[in-house]
Image (tube, rainbow, N blue to C red):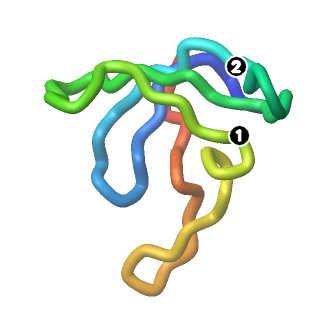
Amino acid sequence: MIKIGIYKHAKTGNEYRVVCLAKHSETLEDLVVYEALYENPKSKFWVRPIAMFTEIVEINGKKTPRFIFIRE
């Protein structure tokens, strides 16, 4: 389960605050709503399927969670 709190993006090191969990209105897919904690000209808020938010990715040959929980 996704905890509400601050996460670090494994690839960029940027921090995000998970605001809440939501459902897609058509498919009922579970989504994570999160806020960029840095200046991002594209958007302040983002959504991503939970499966993608929690997936393991490979960065420089090392497998790691895409988003790493760092604090509440």
The residue shown at (57%, 74%) is 63
Instruction: Give the residue type that dot 2 points to.
Output: Leu
Q: Sort mark 1 into few (<14), some (14-19) or many (20+) by Cα contacts within 10 Å.
A: some
Q: CA distance from mark 2 to mark 1?
A: 8 Å
Q: Is residue 34 left or right of residue 42?
A: right
- Does dot 2 land on a helix, a strand or a loop? strand
Quadrant where the N terminus is found in the figure: top right
The part of the image, by quadrant, that contains residue 3 is: top right
Q: Identify the image quadrant of residue 57.
A: bottom right
Residue 19 sits in quarter? top right
Q: Percent x, y for residue 71?
A: 50, 24
Q: Residue at x 30, y 48 (%)?
A: 13
Label 1 is placed on what type of residue? Ile
Q: Is residue 53 above or below residue 66?
A: above
At 33% across and 25% down in the image, what residue appears? 36
Would residue 64 appear left or right of 45 to someone viewing this image? right
Nearer to the camera, 26 or 50: 26
Residue at numbered disc 1:
50
Instruction: Tell which residue pokes out farthest to the front in this image.
Output: 26
Expressed as whole percent of the image width and height from the top left, the position of residue 61 reads 45, 86
Mark 1 secondary-structure assignment:
helix
Q: Is 34 situated above or below 7? A: above
Residue 7 to residue 19: above or below: below
Point out the image quarter for the C terminus: top right
Q: Earlier in the sequence, mark 2 or mark 1?
A: 2
| Residue 65 picture location, percent across and down | 58, 57
Are the residues at dot 2 and dot 1 in contact (C-beta closer than 8 Å)? yes
Q: Is residue 61 left or right of residue 24?
A: left
Provide residue 42's location: percent of width, then percent of height: 22, 32
Residue named by callout 2:
21
Residue at left 72%, top 18%?
22
